[in-house]
Amino acid sequence: MMGRFLKERMSWIFLIIAMQGLTLLIAWLDRSIPIRPVLYAVFLSMILFLVFLSIRCIKESKFYQELDDWTADLDTDLLPSPSSPFEQIVGEALLMQTTSLRNETYENTALLESEKDDLLAWIHEVKTPLTAMKLMIDRMENEEMKAQLMYEWLRIHLLLDTQLHQKRIPFMHNDLYIEKVSLKPLIIQEIKMLQSWCLQKGIGFDIELEAESVLTDAKWTAFIIRQLLTNAVKYSEQDDIGLKSYQDEHHIYMQIIDHGRGIDAKDLPRIFDKGFTSTTEHQDRSSSGMGLYLTKQAAIALHISISVESVKGEGTTFTLRFPKRNEFESVISV
């Protein structure tokens, strides 16, 4: 802070030094003026100026140091108290702007909460006729029409599911229940949901689960698996998708392996970015760029590490590394 103060007062310091230098110059040029008394007076003046400068630095720096240390949490009670007219102007301006910004933030937060609640309520309302629609589709006798309608129903269901989880992601820590979860029923449930789509594309599943259970939240882990399976089915054609789990000395791993179109090497570092879509299939309007982003956010909350390997034209492998029990100390439920 001392350096900032000196930099701020540099013009005044130069002015005082220049005035003292001018006094010495006049005494040196005018022989009638004794030089020694002038030097003594200049010396005492500079001592006095340095003392004055130190006092002002301590007094003025206190306000600005407190201002510099003030946290950006919009707490006006922590604003430093001004001790001069100029500091008072700064303090009043900060108080007024901070109060206005805080009020605006509260209003925007309340508005976002209201919109989120309205959207969640709408999604739940839509699920009711969607469930009724599925029951009607299940009763249809025309298999070809049934398969087509089931595929369209599934698309709507997955879109609503993604939107629902997108709104829940910021608050998912309030919804976590960590327990031992069996992987096989979870995977079978998600495969059954995608069954009509898989039958339409001629896709099967090869399941090898050496490690049968993991410590996680069942609902959110199902969401992660659902998103990865949806991607695998979407970009595969008439081939089996592999689901494997295994365990080493420290962690349990699960892999989802497809033999679809793969991911371009230049896209791999960005696939979990919000809104990112493939650069090679940029015209694909069915891709929102949200699925893998939400998958990553949910995995972070569950302490699941996601890695991906892919060769363009040969397929993609997503690997989930589940955490150990001691990594869940903040959210453990069992």
Image (cartoon, grey):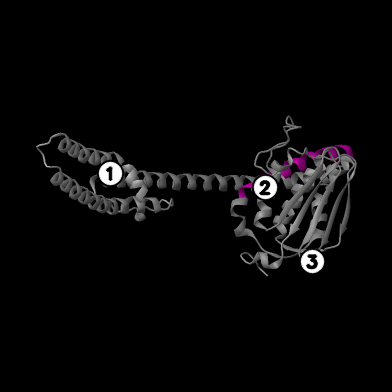
Q: Residue at x 15, y 38 (%)?
A: 27
Quadrant of the rendering where the C terminus is positioned: bottom right
Location of mark 3 (residue) = 249
Mark with earlier residue (1, 2): 1
Q: Which residue is at a point 20% across and 38% down the rendered structure image? A: 19
Do residues under tags 1 and 2 come within 8 Å of each other at their CB atoms?
no
Question: Within the magenta stretch, is there residue 172?
Answer: no
- Element under label 1? helix
Identified by mark 2, the residue type is Leu
Q: Nearer the viewer, mark 3 or mark 2?
A: 3
Q: Amino acid at mark 1?
A: Ile
Q: Nearer the viewer, mark 1 or mark 2?
A: 1
Residue 292 pos. (x, y %) = 71, 45
- Between the residue at mark 3 and the residue at mark 1, the CA separation in whole angstroms equals 64 Å
Report the disc number at residue 294: 2
Residues shaded magenta = 142-167
Tag 1 or tag 3, which sits nearer the N-term?
Answer: 1
Label 1: which residue?
89
Predominant SS of the magenta segment: helix
Mark 3 and mark 2 lie on one chain; the one further toward the N terminus is: 3
Q: Residue furthest bottom?
A: 334
Query: Which residue is nearer to you in this view: 46 or 278?
Result: 46
